Amino acid sequence: MKKIDPGVVITAIHQCTRKEHSGEARQDVFQKQIEITKAARGVSNTVYAWYGAPAKEVESILAHGFGGPSKVSASETYGVGVYLSPFGLPHLSAKFSEADDSGEKHIILCRVILGNVEKVVAGSQQHYPSSIDFDTGTDDPKNPKWYVVWPSVMDRHIIPECVVCFKSSINVSGNFPGQVRGSTHTKYSLEKLFSKLRSSLPPEKIKELAKLYDVYRVGKLTKNIFIRHMRSVVGDYVLLSAIREIRSSE
């Protein structure tokens, strides 16, 4: 994550212990699914991947397993399912995390049974395999940014291994409509940020961002959801670069 956020600080790593009966049961189900997938495909294609979420969702996942598909912006949709980023790309999942009361964010390192992976086209609303030959989806089989585990198999194909807690220097949080707070607690107007982003984003993303802000401004989105969607549309690297340019010009 330091490639995107040089100031990130890892504050804790918590190993998932599965001592309760429900945890042991989920472990057994996952192990059996590995065997089933091996028998059907020759290999289970089990990998490590990251899942980012707000603290309360992380707690729920650790206690009860995954409860539903990920919420992603229209520009990054590759089907309906649980989105996990490859082991080498934790920053992609980190953008779905939200700081808790102590300022910490959380991402879960999971083991994921991919089996046979199929390419899912951008904007697709697919929510199950296109044929019996596939088990999971991805945006790009050769160079994936996202693995997509379908809702019907998410509890059998994903198991959390540990939770990484961190504090990010990319602390984009709006205290009230029209302002964005940067890592130095300088407030930038969204209008100035939009103006800066126009030079680095394609027209369709600018349009999506403007629509998102309009929905937020009339009170139909909470601050946290607005910030999460904005980061998803823009990307942390582009957003941080824009904030730095604004900061250096002031």
Image: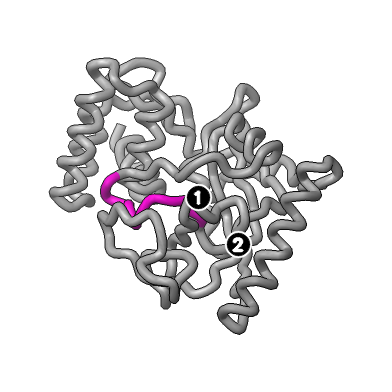
Residue 148 placement, left or right of 10: left
For badge 2, the amino acid type reads Val
Q: Quadrant of residue 102?
A: top right
Horizontal and vertical percent for residue 239? Answer: 35, 43
Vertical placement of residue 186 versus 161, above or below: above
Q: Would you say residue 15 is visible in this rendering?
A: no
Residue occupying the point 35% across, 15% down: 176
Residue 135 placement, left or right of 199: right
In the image shown, does 103 or 58 lie closer to the viewer? 58
The CA distance from mark 1 to mark 2 is 15 Å
Residue occupying the point 40% across, 41% down: 71
Q: Quadrant of the N terminus?
A: bottom right
Residue 217 placement, left or right of 203: right
For the record, the magenta segment spans: 74-84
Residue 93 marker: 1
Residue occupying the point 52% across, 46% down: 94
Vertical placement of residue 192 versus 26, above or below: above
Q: Would you say residue 20 is visible in this rendering?
A: yes
Horizontal and vertical percent for residue 231? Answer: 37, 41
Q: Secondary structure at mark 2?
A: strand
Residue identifier under label 2? 112
Q: Secondary structure at mark 1?
A: helix
Q: Is residue 83 magenta?
A: yes
